[in-house]
Amino acid sequence: MAKKILVIDDEPELVRAITVRFEASGYKAIPAFDGQEGIAKAKKLKPDLILLDIIMPGMDGYEVCRRLKADPDTKNIPVLILTASGQRDLEEKCTSAGGNIVITKPFDTEDLLASVNKFIK
């Protein structure tokens, strides 16, 4: 059975590109385009890993991550934070919200895949 990766990002083109790349590598990629949808899909589908954008309309990625980590059903799912933000304290903010690592956009899909493989295999 293919490992499931939930991709929570409000950029449809990026979600599509990640989905295509991960499915070509044998993963099942599940798209979510905002925080509420992402939390609902995480609780329902129990993915093996979550890729989470920080800057989204409505609920930002920090809040999504905090809610996922506070929920017994989703607290043990690794969360890889995706961001285009260059904030100085970004790494600290992401880890304090419960994220495992931060990946800065734009990123190389092979590097992203390597990071995901470290957490899933």
Image (cartoon, helix red, strand yellow):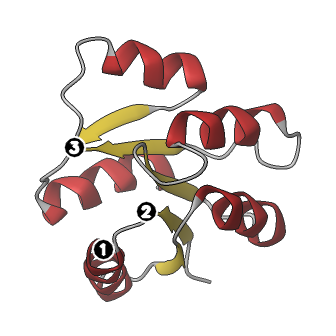
Mark 1 or mark 3: name the one nearer the start of the chain: 1
Label 1: how many residues lie within 10 Å, few (<14), some (14-19) or many (20+)? some
Percent position of residue 27, x then y: 45, 78
Q: Which residue is mark 1?
A: 18
Report the mark closest to the observer, 1 or 2. Answer: 2
99 displayed left or right of 110:
right
Label 1 – label 2 distance at C-alpha: 10 Å
Disc 2 residue type (three-letter): Asp
Image coords of residue 42 (percent x, y)? 72, 62
Label 3: which secondary element = loop
Which residue type does callout 1 highlight? Ile
- Location of mark 2 (residue): 9
Asked if the residue under mark 2 is in contact with the one under mark 3, i.e. CB atoms within 8 Å, the reply is: no
Earlier along the polypeptide chain: callout 1 or callout 2?
2
Tell me whether circle 1 and circle 2 mark residues in contact (CB < 8 Å): yes
Q: Which residue is painted at 24% across and 55% down in the image?
A: 112
Residue at the extreme front: 58
Q: CA distance from mark 1 to mark 3?
A: 16 Å
Residue 84: which disc? 3
Image point (48%, 78%), residue name = 29
Q: What type is the residue that disc 3 sits on?
A: Ala
